[in-house]
Image (cartoon, helix red, strand yellow):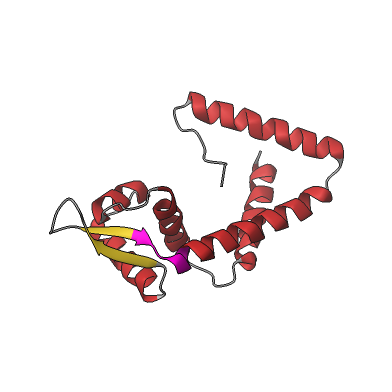
Amino acid sequence: MSDLARLLESVVESERDVSPRPLSVSQLRAVVALDRHDGVNLRQLAEQLGSTPPLVSRLCDRLEAVGFLERLPSARSRRELTLRLSDRGRAYLQDLRARRRDRLEALLTKMSPGGRAALAAGLKEYRALAAAAGDPPDLHH
């Protein structure tokens, strides 16, 4: 089991090289969360990230500085801001996903047909287990 975990970790780690302008893990998690939940406020984003509003506010400052995030007035409250990915942030994420997909497809072509079938079966089992635990993985991106 630990060998499999190390193997998966090495695949994920190699994905950092695919990013044209690498973000920190926290920044990337925030970008993905904003892509999935457009127009949240700071408190909601902090909850999604399992963090605190002050830490997420600083994270948003950095994302805004690189042009990936927009803070807009909220339609619900004058005291709140709505957080949205900018066009640049969306383009970055789309490019990153395409690069990762290309890299994974290249890796999969090197596997035997039996190995690909076993991997597919394992991923289906993982999804079923995660769904049964109430935590369905988001594998559609």
Q: Position of residue 38 (x, y in %)?
A: 37, 52
Most extreme residue toward the bottom is 65
Q: Position of residue 101 (x, y in %)?
A: 67, 54
**Magenta span contains residue 87:** yes
The structure residue drawn at horizontal position 59% and vertical position 57%, both measured from the top left corner, is 97
Closer-to-camera residue (107/88):
88
Most extreme residue toward the front is 75
The structure residue drawn at horizontal position 50% and vertical position 28%, both measured from the top left corner, is 131
39 vs 129: above or below: below
Q: Position of residue 117 (x, y in %)?
A: 78, 34
| Left or right: 9 in relation to 41 | right
| Left or right: 127 in relation to 90 | right
Q: Which residues are magenta?
A: 84-89
Closer-to-camera residue (46/82):
82
| Left or right: 104 in relation to 109 | left
The structure residue drawn at horizontal position 26% and vertical position 54%, both measured from the top left corner, is 41
Q: Position of residue 105 (x, y in %)?
A: 74, 51
